[in-house]
Every structure is written in structure tokens, then in C-alpha cells.
């Protein structure tokens, strides 16, 4: 049997659904060292025996040159979009470089093949199988088990989780129907098919039964579902972990049903092991990322284990919007933690497509990503922000995520500063109610400083003083809105027409209020320092503006001084 991380084994597992062999001998590649997306604008150092994805390559000249470059760095294979016109130059480059050329079939996306290949490679990293076997196949990975079950029931199978996402699939999928191919390409059962299964009560019957459930072909109005299915729920005690689905011509014989049940127990155990291993790895990675960002004595060791030592990096911080957070009950908190972890896992995959050494983990209520960046590019922070924007576009609006991007850390000593910058940018986004979802620290530095100054004011218990305090006291006593009037005038740069329109009052009414606030507050609006002090106080003490009144236009006991009419607008 082929080694689990060999190229021949990967092609065997993926079959002809995603990738086809174009040129070269995959049996010569015993070990695939990782999956890398080729970026023509970046100088990449490939891991040993890397499998390179040549996204966007079209001409034979581009393919030939990249094959030669891959050969120099010892890459195992190059994947380009099929169909590939096999020219003598390409054949010669394959022979010279020793790099196998593969084609990504039409209908399959690069995101799908990245996820599949990395899943297969990760499966190969699991510890060697023990004595557990199915049909003489070791229980080392789910793809092996899927192929073993397919041999037992003589039908192509998929292993799915509770959400009908594909965890693994067997070979021989070309024997199935169109809906199975669509499922594998999309890495999950299409939504219209899951709705049909739910409407027919298939999932309820599946989860109630400990025996395989026979499912007649679905009537979808097309020929996509020609074959029936036999499904078996995968259980660990009372917990449903997922299910096995075999595309069959007829119900299974009693012997094959028993074999499927026996295999299901082993697959469930293996899924539990994988989940436990994933939890351990996740906690370990979280500890490493936290240590690396903290600048503690062990940060260099943590960075070394993450593969980020001696690299320039940027820290990116992700968090849920406050409005998206559930209440503080135990179940709600668990939901929040699970949602943030799901987002962190998705962001880790997204970062890995940009740079293989990128690391991501949840620390507290924030998911941090450490992204290696080139040392000499002046637009590094902009590129990091674009990576974040692209991620948010991919996951859509269902997840209410905010992203702060820190400054570049030239070396490991700068990572804590980059994290602090990302945290500060994230806090500005959380404090604002606008639609902005991504911010660099350099974009929001002033807002961050104001928030920190507000923290200092709150910590010291500093009271509001001066002109704004007098206006706030007057508003509270007389149900007036002089503080709002001052804010509107300042925000309009002294333009009475614009300020009165913002407050929906007549300009003459606004001028009267303006003269009144000058008298009550004792503020000189023609003095730049007084205006700045008032603007700063309005930002740091937002509670000052909390009283709107109905008596604004009635005269008060104090007379209005003629000098108040000499106010000059700022523009």
C-alpha cells in the first residue's frame, strides 16, 4: 500500500473528481512536504517536496518556467488548471525537474483542492495506526477507512459530519451519480438535497436507528440523483458524530450491513481520536501564539516551534462585534467560544493560503493571526488589510467580525507592539457604530489615543469642568440642549446654516441658542484653544450631552449681552 502522504496515494484518494495526472511519474514521490499557492509577485521559499498550486497559469511558457523553478527547490508536483496542452517544452521541463504535472479539472475550485490536499496531508501526519483494521486497511486516516468501507459494501462512500460536510470519500466516485459529484466538489451535500432529506424525515430515521437506513433515489426533478443511498449514523455513546453514505443500486445484504455497522464503530472511534488530537493541537498552538505575542522569555522558542523565527510579521486581531455577542449564560458563552474558534480555524486556512508559515489561534476573546511578510515592501500593512477584507468577503455577513491590523514587526521583539497595535485598532472598531470592519492601526491612531485618554479619565474619576460642565448643568436644570448646540456648531466648523440644518431648527433659532451658550458657558468661540478644549471634552465625556429640552427658545432671567452677536463663523 502506498504511504499516506505519497503523491500516488493522494491521486488515488482524490480519484478523477478533482485532479488528473498530466505528465510525470507520481510513484517516484514518496512524501509530499506541504501545499503552497504560487504567487508570481513574491519570492517564495518552498518546503521540501512541496505540492505547488499554479493558480492563474495559462501559457505553456509560464508552466515550463514554473516547473523548472519547482525542480530547483525540490517540489514534488505542480497543479495547473486543466485542460493542459502538453508541449515538448513542458514534457522536457517535467523530465528535467522531476516535478510531476497535475491538472485541476473544470468545475473544481482552487479553494476546494487546497482544503482537500491539506486535509490529506494532515491525515498523513497522524500517528501510525495500531492494531485496528478494516478489511486489512489500517485505521490511520479517514480516507483509508472510506476506501475500506467502499470495498466492504462494493459501492462508493462518503464520510460526513453532522452538518453534512464531507470529511473523507472513497475512490470509484465516477460510479455514483451527479449529486455525489456535486457533493464532493462542494465538500458538503448541496442545500436543496439536505432539505429534501429533512422533509422526508431521513435524518430523523437515521439518527434513531443503529442499523443502516435505505434511502430511495431523491426526486429532484432532474437526473442528478439516480442511485439510492444506504446511510449509517456514526455514534459515540449518545452523541451523533456524523454518518456514512454509500451510493448503491439496491439494499445491502445482511452480511454487508453487519460489516458496515462494524466499520462504523471503528470510524466513530477514529473520529473521536481525531477530535481529541485536534483539541490538543489547538490548545498547544494557542499557547505558542500567546507566548510568541507576549514577548516573554520563551517567545523565541515559541516562534521557532511555529516556524516564524527571524521573520518580519504582522499581527491581525479578529473579534466578534459586541452586538453579535450573546448573553452571559453558560450556553451562550459556549456558543460564543465555539463561534470564535470556528472563525479562527477558517482564518487559519485563509492565512495559510497566503503564507504557509502563518499561525492563528484564539487567545481570550480574540483570534490572533501572525502573518509573515516581506521585509522591504512599503505596502505591507495595506496587503495585510486586503487579506483581512478578502477573508470577510469569503465568509459573508453571517459572522459579524471586526479585524484590527497591527504595524509591521521587523523581528520577534516587535511582535508585542504589533499585537498591541492590532488590539487598539480592533477596539476603535468595536467602539464605533459605523459599517467599517477592518482597520489598520495607522488609520485609527487618533481615535485609539482618545479611547485611551478616556480610560485615564475614567480611572482617575476626573469630573467634567469648565464651559462644557456649565452647559451640561444648565441643560439638566432647564431641559435645554446647549451642549448639543455647541457640538453641532463645532462639527460644522462654525457654519450656522449647516449646524442648524443638522439640528432641524431655523438658523435664527440656532443663532439665539448659540449666543445663549456663550453666555451660560462663558466660552470664547473665536479662541482656537477654547474650541479644541470643548471638542476634546465632548469626546471624553459623552454623557454631557444627555438632555434635550422644550424650553430652549424662551428667554431666561439673565439678559443677553450685545457682545454675543459678534460671533464669527469659522468659515
Image (tube, rainbow, N blue to C red):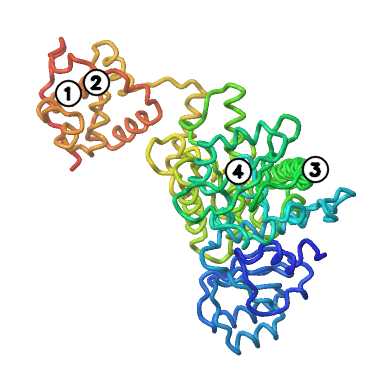
Q: Return the disc, 1 or 4, that comes first in the chain's sequence.
A: 4
Disc 3 crowd rating (10 Å Cα; few below 14, some 14-19, many 20+) is few
Image point (76%, 31%), residue name: 237
* Residue denoted by label 3: 262
Residue 309 position in % (x across, y down): 71, 57
Q: Return the disc, 3 or 1, that comes first in the chain's sequence.
A: 3
Q: CA distance from mark 3 to mark 4?
A: 20 Å
* Residue denoted by label 1: 513
Label 1–label 2 contact, CB within 8 A: yes
Residue 76 position in % (x across, y down): 71, 72
- Judged left or right of residue 505, residue 126 is right
Looking at the image, how many numbered discs can be counted on the residues? 4
In the picture as drawn, the residue positioned furthest to the right comes out as 131
Q: Return the disc, 3 or 4, that comes first in the chain's sequence.
A: 4
Q: CA distance from mark 2 to mark 4?
A: 70 Å
Q: Nearer the viewer, residue 136 or 569?
A: 136
> Above or below — where is 328 with respect to 76?
above
Residue 481 is labelled as 2
Residue 215 is labelled as 4
Residue 87 is labelled as none
Q: Secondary structure at mark 2?
A: loop
Q: Secondary structure at mark 4?
A: strand
Q: CA distance from mark 1 to mark 4?
A: 76 Å
Residue 253 position in % (x across, y down): 74, 47
Q: Return the disc, 2 or 4, that comes first in the chain's sequence.
A: 4
Residue 432, located in which quarter of the rendered image?
top left
Q: Return the disc, 3 or 2, that comes first in the chain's sequence.
A: 3
- Residue 275 showing in the rendered view: yes
Image point (77%, 51%), residue name: 301
Amino acid at each position: 500500500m502506498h504511504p499516506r502522504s505519497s503523491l500516488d496515494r493522494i491521486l488515488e484518494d482524490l480519484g478523477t473528481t478533482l485532479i488528473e495526472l498530466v505528465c510525470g511519474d507520481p510513484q517516484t514521490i514518496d512524501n509530499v512536504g506541504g501545499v503552497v499557492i504560487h504567487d508570481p509577485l513574491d519570492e517564495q521559499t518552498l518546503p521540501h517536496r512541496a505540492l505547488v498550486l499554479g493558480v492563474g497559469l495559462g501559457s505553456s511558457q509560464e508552466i515550463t518556467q514554473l516547473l523548472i523553478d519547482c525542480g530547483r527547490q525540490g517540489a514534488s508536483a505542480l497543479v495547473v488548471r486543466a485542460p493542459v496542452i502538453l508541449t515538448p517544452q513542458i514534457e522536457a521541463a517535467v523530465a528535467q525537474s522531476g516535478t510531476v504535472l497535475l491538472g485541476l479539472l473544470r468545475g473544481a475550485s482552487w479553494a476546494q483542492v487546497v482544503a482537500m490536499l491539506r486535509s490529506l496531508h494532515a491525515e498523513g501526519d497522524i500517528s501510525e495506526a495500531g492494531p485496528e483494521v478494516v478489511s486489512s486497511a489500517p485505521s490511520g486516516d479517514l480516507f483509508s477507512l472510506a476506501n475500506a468501507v467502499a470495498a466492504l459494501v462494493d459501492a462508493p462512500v462518503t464520510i460526513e459530519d453532522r452538518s453534512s460536510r464531507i470529511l473523507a470519500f472513497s475512490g470509484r466516485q465516477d460510479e455514483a451519480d451527479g449529486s455525489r459529484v456535486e457533493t464532493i466538489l462542494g465538500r458538503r451535500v448541496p442545500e436543496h438535497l439536505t432539505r429534501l432529506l429533512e422533509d422526508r424525515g431521513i435524518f430523523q430515521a437515521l439518527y434513531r436507528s443503529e442499523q443502516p437506513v435505505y434511502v430511495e433515489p431523491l426526486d429532484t426533478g432532474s437526473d442528478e440523483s439516480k442511485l439510492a443511498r444506504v446511510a449509517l449514523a456514526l455514534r459515540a455513546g449518545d452523541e451523533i458524530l456524523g454518518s456514512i453514505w454509500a451510493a448503491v443500486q439496491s439494499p445491502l445484504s445482511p452480511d454487508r450491513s453487519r460489516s458496515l455497522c462494524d466499520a462504523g464503530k471503528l470510524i466513530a472511534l477514529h473520529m473521536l481520536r481525531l477530535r481529541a488530537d485536534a483539541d490538543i493541537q489547538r490548545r498547544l498552538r494557542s499557547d505558542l501564539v500567546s507566548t510568541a505575542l507576549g514577548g516573554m522569555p520563551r517567545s523565541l522558542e515559541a516562534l521557532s516551534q511555529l516556524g516564524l523565527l527571524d521573520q518580519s510579521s504582522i499581527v491581525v486581531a479578529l473579534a466578534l462585534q459586541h452586538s453579535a455577542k450573546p448573553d452571559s449564560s453558560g450556553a451562550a458563552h459556549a456558543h460564543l467560544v465555539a463561534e470564535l474558534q470556528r472563525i479562527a480555524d477558517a482564518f487559519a486556512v485563509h492565512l495559510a493560503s497566503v503564507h504557509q508559515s502563518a499561525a492563528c489561534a484564539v487567545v481570550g476573546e480574540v483570534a490572533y493571526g501572525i502573518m509573515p511578510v516581506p521585509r522591504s515592501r512599503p505596502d505591507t500593512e495595506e496587503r495585510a488589510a486586503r487579506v483581512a477584507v478578502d477573508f470577510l468577503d469569503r465568509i459573508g455577513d453571517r459572522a459579524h467580525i471586526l479585524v484590527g491590523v497591527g504595524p509591521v514587526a521587523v523581528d520577534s521583539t516587535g511582535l508585542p507592539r504589533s499585537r498591541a497595535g492590532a488590539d487598539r485598532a480592533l477596539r476603535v472598531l468595536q467602539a464605533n457604530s459605523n459599517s467599517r470592519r477592518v482597520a489598520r492601526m495607522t488609520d485609527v491612531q487618533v481615535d485609539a489615543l482618545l479611547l485611551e485618554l478616556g480610560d485615564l479619565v475614567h480611572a482617575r474619576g476626573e469630573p467634567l469642568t469648565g464651559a462644557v460642565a456649565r452647559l451640561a448643568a444648565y441643560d439638566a436644570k432647564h431641559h435645554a440642549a446647549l451642549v448639543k448646540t455647541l457640538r453641532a456648531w463645532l462639527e460644522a466648523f462654525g457654519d450656522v446654516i449647516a449646524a442648524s440644518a443638522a439640528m432641524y431648527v431655523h438658523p435664527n433659532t440656532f443663532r439665539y441658542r448659540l449666543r445663549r451658550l456663550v453666555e451660560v458657558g462663558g466660552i470664547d468661540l473665536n479662541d482656537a484653544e477654547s474650541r479644541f478644549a470643548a471638542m476634546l471634552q465632548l469626546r471624553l465625556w459623552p454623557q454631557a450631552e444627555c438632555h434635550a429640552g422644550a424650553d430652549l427658545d424662551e428667554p431666561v432671567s439673565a439678559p443677553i449681552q450685545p457682545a454675543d452677536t459678534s460671533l464669527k463663523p469659522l468659515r
